[in-house]
Each structure stands twice: as structure tokens, then as C-alpha cells.
Amino acid sequence: MSKLNGKVAVVTGGNSGIGYASAQELKANGANVIITGRSAEKVDNAAKELGVKGIVADVSDLAAIDSLVAQVKEEFGKLDILFVNAGIFQPAPVGQISEEMFDHQMGINFKGALFTTEKFLPILNEGASIINLSSVNAYTGMPNTAVYAASKAALNSYTRTAATELAPKKIRINSVNPGPVYTPIFGKTGMPEEQLGGFAEAMQNRIPLKRFGQPEDIAKLVGFLASDDASFITGSEYNIDGGINVNPLLVD
Ligand code: NAD
């Protein structure tokens, strides 16, 4: 029997990258999956490819999250797996951080993520699993990532507090901290192709396992944390980064 049979899962930002691969993994393990995203066309296309339900919902709009929860409740009743994955990466150097960029990035990566959980709580089943997609950036001083890193550090802090408070309801909540993973996220930063290539090469050389992660690498961990195999795990964080976080001074 598949380990997620009979479970209902929501994956925010499930039309691309890590969310897409995770939706595929959760479905392959038997879950009934709903993906969300901002663009109706992209959500529809991905939902068709994956053979799952697609719902358009911008996580920076709290009313849109309310509507998402209402639609999931109406069609599926209760939820067992909530993968809070939607996020953006907007680099900017210290000294050039605009209020607009701060609000936008925090609004999706922290406020949007936090309220996704807050608003789904009333329909979460006992024994449900919440997985927050964070980043190793929460712990590094990587240049140009001050706001992005803070948004993920804040999310991990919420994970810890929520784990304690939700434990009496047997709801588990954990964070996954990937290192660099090949997804479309970097192309959305507006950085020129050449600069992105240089960044990728420099980064890859610093990763002990000498490669970027693939979305499927992260999806496997998400599938595990979503399942009852992880029933004694809550309030934890998992670095999944080819070892970069333990060896930042690696030379070659
Ligand atoms: P991606 O750009 O392929 O996917 C991001 C998804 O989030 C897309 O589906 C997008 O539509 C959705 N999204 C963005 N803003 C949204 C909003 N306001 N409302 C609803 N959906 C929204 O990138 P990815 O790399 O798969 O990113 C997924 C998560 O992984 C993000 O939280 C990101 O911060 C995190 N992450 C990525 C990496 C990496 O190297 N790719 C590393 C660490 C963490």
C-alpha cells in the first residue's frame, strides 16, 4: 500500500520547481493533491500534466488564502498535508534595500507562508503534517540575500513555536532548508544570464557533493516528512544542501 493513501495534500507554488516535483512525489505515494500558484494558465497546465487539482491563489493576498481554504474545505473536507512552498528570491545589496522589495519578499516568503498555515489550521486533521520550505540562507551571510535570508529565518522561528503549540493536536510542523537547487527561481531575479552562470559555477564548486540539488531530491524529503514514517518528528529543520552548510570554507 502507498504510504500516503487517503491523505489530502496542498502544495503552494506547485506549478514549478520544487513544488511541482513534490506534488508529483506526493501523488505517486497515493495522496490526493491540490496545487496552487499565481498564474491561472501555469496552474492549469501544471495541474493537467500532474493529474491533480489546481487552484489559483496568491499567498500575499490573505483574502485569496481564505478563498483557497474554503474551496479545499468544500471539495475535500479536511487536509492532512500542507506543503508551504511558494516563495520568491529577490537579491539586493545592503544599503540598497527598498521598502517595496522588503514588503514584497517578506509578504510572500514570511507573511504569506505564516498565514497559509494560520488559515488552514481549522481544517487540518489530527496527525496532519505541515512542511515549510525554508533555505540554508536562513543561516548564512551570503551577499545580497539580507531580506530573503531574514524571511526564511523568520519562517523557521515560526516553525519552532508552532510545533510546540500544535503538538497537543498531534499536528507536526517542520522546515526543509535546501541549498541551491536547479529551478526557474534564479531566472526570475532579473540577473543577466551570464551573471547567473557565473554564480552557479562558483556555488557548485563550494558544495562538497559538487552539484546543485534537483527538485526531486527535495521532493523525497517532503514525501517522508508528510508521511506517518515521520510521526515522531516535529519542530525540526532539515538541511538538504550537498553539505554546503557544514563546509563554508571549502577551497576545492
Ligand atoms: P520556482 O520559482 O520554480 O517556484 C516557486 C513557486 O512559488 C512557483 O510555483 C510560483 O508560482 C510560486 N509563487 C511565488 N510567489 C507566489 C505567490 N505570491 N502566491 C502563490 N504562489 C507563488 O522556485 P523554487 O526554487 O521551486 O522555489 C520554491 C521554494 O523553494 C521557495 O520558497 C524558495 O525560496 C525555496 N528555495 C529554493 C532554492 C533553490 O535553490 N531553488 C533554495 C532554497 C529554498
Image: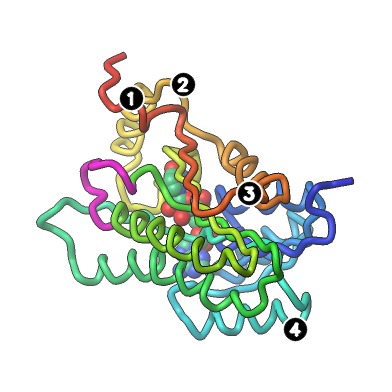
Q: Give the answer, above or below, for where 35 lies relative to 121.
A: above
Q: Which of these two is toward me, 191 or 67?
A: 67
Q: Which residues are magenta?
A: 138-147
Residue 49: name its quadrant. Answer: bottom right
Q: Residue furthest front?
A: 168
Residue 209 circle label = 2
Q: Crowding at label 3, few (<14), some or many (≥20) Cα neighbours within 10 Å? A: few
Image point 49% across, 42% down: which residue? 238
Q: Amino acid at mark 4?
A: Glu
Q: Amino acid at mark 3?
A: Phe
Instruction: Give the mark nearest the N terminus, 1 or 4.
Output: 4
Image point 59% across, 75% down: which residue? 121
Q: Position of residue 96 (x, y in %)?
A: 13, 58
The residue that disc 4 covers is: 74
Instruction: Give the mark nearest the N terminus, 4 or 3.
Output: 4
Instruction: Give the mark nearest the N terminus, 2 or 3.
Output: 2
Q: Is residue 232 visible?
A: yes
Q: CA distance from mark 1 to mark 4?
A: 48 Å
Q: Amino acid at mark 2?
A: Leu
Quarter of the image where the C terminus is located: top left
The residue that disc 1 covers is: 247
Dominant SS type (magenta): loop
Q: Crowding at label 4, few (<14), some or many (≥20) Cα neighbours within 10 Å? A: few
Q: Give the answer, above or below, for where 38 lies relative to 192.
A: below
Q: Position of residue 156 (x, y in %)?
A: 41, 56
Element under disc 1? loop
Image point 34% across, 52% down: which residue? 189
Q: Which of these two is toward me, 90 or 41?
A: 90
Q: CA distance from mark 2 to mark 3?
A: 29 Å
* Disc nearest the viewer among 3 and 1: 3
Q: Position of residue 75 (x, y in %)?
A: 78, 79
